[in-house]
Amino acid sequence: MARDRLQRLIDLAGRQRDQSIAFDRGVTDSFQPPTPTFFYQVALEDNWTVLANVWYDYVLNDRWSLYGGGGLGAAGYNLSVNDTVVEGRGATTDLAFQVGVGLSYRLREKLTIDFGYRYVDMGKADIALTGIGGGVPAGNYTLDVTSHDFVVAFRFNRLGDFLRR
């Protein structure tokens, strides 16, 4: 069966990213130069996103398609920071967006496998820092939370039709 060259797909996608990250991409006003730079241990946990997306498939032949698109939604996560002098912890919910590209292969009329890349921006976390043990205010720690996702997914077109087969 011939397919239109350009197809639009709309989806609602939820994703849980249960990860602990030890890195420092954030900015702090806790210590100002010439104070030595401290190395923060940063943990981002219980990370989730819910995004409404629009994807456009460009059909190459009966089986293969290239696609691109993106979406908007919400993200949430818990962030903790510690450098052995100051610490902070907080939960954040923020606006999120993603853009992505990929390649899809039609397995059956209503079933497609998708290989893709997504850049996801989950907003900016800003948590207050305090001195360890003393609770003395020590500035803020700000982090842009992003993700580079490589995905393998299945698409069910008209799920009811697929299940009746």
Image: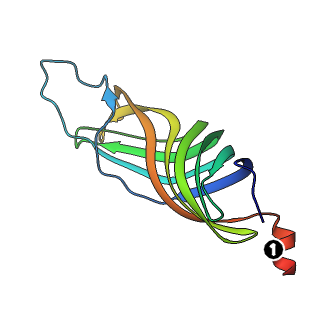
List the residue tagged with mark 1. Answer: 162
In this picture, residue 76 sits left or right of residue 109: left
Q: Is residue 25 above or below residue 150?
A: above
Task: Point out the image quarter for the N terminus.
Answer: bottom right
Q: Where, by quadrant of the figure, is residue 92 drawn?
A: top right
Residue 151 horizontal/vertical position (percent): 51, 59
Residue 136 horizontal/vertical position (percent): 34, 29
Under tag 1, what secondary structure? helix
Residue at horizontal 33 percent and vertical 33 percent from the top: 26
Observer-nearest residue: 77 or 121? 121
Q: Residue furthest bottom?
A: 165
Q: Please, what is the three-letter code of the amino acid marked with disc 1?
A: Phe
Q: Is residue 93 visible?
A: no
Observer-nearest residue: 33 or 3? 3
Residue 139 horizontal/vertical position (percent): 35, 24
Residue at horizontal 81 percent and vertical 68 percent from the top: 159
